[in-house]
Image (cartoon, grey):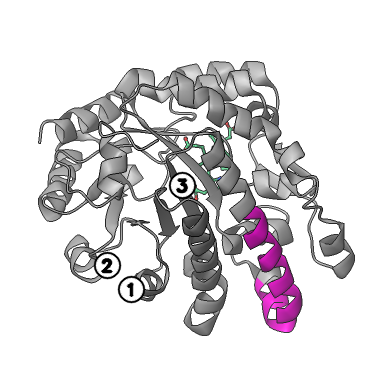
């Protein structure tokens, strides 16, 4: 599966490829008019994620426009709760909703045995993408990291303060550990199956890592990421894993020391010289502010060049520091890609 002509894969294997490979988190999505057309015909968001025809089509859309070096399968981190049998839906204009898991009974009702069958279409999507994307494009599979997924499972949707999740975590750590362990085990099986279906690289999104500090960060962010990465490395030694403990600040250092991931994705607040010197041996990815890509103009270009200057000579993947925003103008994305490719 390792092809010498995939710049993103080579970079994650430790080579300082220049110009750096580029892809954008959430590169398939609402900033693309063609996404909105497919989205409207697919029905509910979850139907889109579970329909191979539609999900493959929206994955390919950003590649046709910008020839990104990475293609991230179209799906969502809430596929894991869905696969465990939790009720998940997307309320139009409101984001994700789930029937919350907060009790022993609700935890016991989660069903790992039926997981692969419920998410079966995802593996089909990866298989089809493998045969349809260009040979030089790296296929990225992904999942949410356990802490972030647990917040959705417990809160029943997005949250500002994670109050219910954190209360449960501190009042009943044994219960919370059982939930995290189930998500760890499920995520290893899920990502491993994505590799078997053709994924070259995996990314773990810990979008809400910054909600925890001290021993709680170690136990609920670092430890689950470490266990997942170690298990995947044992099963698929050549498949690089990128971790994204978003907005973790100085805790990125402890994370990097303890999680044997090949790559670290950086949010826009991480100073690149610090990252290069401290998180160094790992391949780094990031970290353009997605709002700069909305704003465009000289401010965008100045920042893009600053990132390039800081990372030249290091294994580096150009990306955003978080997902692309729906208001992003298409010509700003084109200008970004042209600039990076001109280096
Ligand atoms: O990167 C890609 O192109 C692949 C697709 C992808 C989606 N979600 C599609 C999506 C990926 C990698 C994700 C990850 C994801 N999903 C995360 C982690 C990354 C991050 O952004 O922090 C999280 C926290 C979720 C959960 C989620 N999914 C939320 C909170 C929402 C609603 C907010 C929103 O942006 O609408 C979603 C919905 C979602 N996932 C959309 C897309 C394209 C928009 C749905 C629509 O079309 O209406």
| Left or right: 146 as drawn, with respect to 137 | right
Nearest-to-viewer mark from 3 and 1:
3
Name the residue tied to disc 3.
Answer: 202
Residue placed at 48% from the left, 30% from the top?
29
Between the residue at mark 1 and the residue at mark 2, the CA separation in whole angstroms equals: 6 Å
Q: Earlier in the sequence, mark 3 or mark 2?
A: 3
Q: Is mark 2 on a helix, strand or loop?
A: loop
Residue placed at 80% from the left, 66% from the top?
102
Q: Which of marks 1 and 2 is nearer the N terminus?
A: 1
Between the residue at mark 3 and the residue at mark 1, the CA separation in whole angstroms equals: 21 Å
Between the residue at mark 3 and the residue at mark 2, the CA separation in whole angstroms equals: 19 Å
Q: How many labels does the image show?
A: 3
Q: Between 278 and 133, which is closer to the camera in this rendering?
A: 133
Name the residue tied to disc 1.
Answer: 253
The stretch in magenta equals 166-187
Name the residue tied to disc 2.
Answer: 279
Classed neighbour count for the residue bearing mark 3: other residues with Cα under 10 Å, few (<14), some (14–19), many (≥20):
many
Residue 36 vs 71, above or below: the answer is: above
């Amino acid at each position: 599966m390792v092809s010498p002509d995939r710049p993103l894969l080579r970079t994650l294997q430790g080579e300082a490829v220049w110009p750096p490979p580029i892809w954008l988190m959430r590169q398939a999505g609402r900033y693309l008019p063609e996404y909105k057309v497919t989205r409207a015909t697919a029905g509910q968001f979850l139907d889109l994620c579970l329909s191979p025809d539609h999900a493959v089509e929206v994955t390919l859309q950003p590649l046709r426009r910008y020839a990104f070096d990475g293609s991230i399968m179209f799906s969502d981190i809430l596929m894991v709760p869905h696969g465990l049998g939790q009720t998940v839906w997307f309320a139009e204009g409101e984001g994700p909703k789930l029937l919350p898991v907060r009790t022993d009974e609700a935890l016991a009702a989660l069903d790992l045995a039926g997981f692969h069958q419920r998410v079966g279409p995802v593996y089909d999507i990866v298989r089809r993408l493998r045969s349809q994307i260009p040979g030089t494009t790296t296929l990225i599979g992904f999942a949410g990291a356990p802490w972030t997924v647990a917040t959705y499972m417990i809160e029943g949707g997005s949250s500002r303060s994670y109050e219910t999740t954190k209360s449960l975590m501190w009042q009943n750590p044994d219960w919370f550990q059982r939930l995290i362990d189930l998500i760890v085990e499920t995520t290893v099986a899920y990502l491993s199956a994505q590799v078997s279906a053709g994924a070259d690289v995996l990314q773990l999104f810990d979008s809400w890592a910054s909600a925890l500090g001290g021993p709680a960060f170690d136990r609920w962010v670092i430890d689950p990421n470490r266990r997942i990465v170690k298990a995947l490395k044992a099963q698929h030694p050549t498949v690089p894993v990128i971790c994204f403990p978003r907005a973790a600040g100085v805790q990125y250092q402890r994370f990097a020391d303890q999680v044997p991931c090949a790559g670290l994705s950086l949010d826009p607040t991480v100073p690149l010289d610090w990252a290069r010197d401290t998180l160094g041996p790992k391949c780094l990815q990031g970290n353009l502010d997605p709002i700069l890509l909305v704003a465009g103009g000289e401010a965008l270009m100045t920042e893009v060049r600053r990132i390039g200057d800081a990372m030249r000579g290091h294994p580096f993947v150009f990306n955003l520091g978080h997902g692309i925003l729906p208001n992003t103008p298409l010509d700003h994305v084109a200008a970004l890609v042209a600039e990076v490719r001109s280096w």
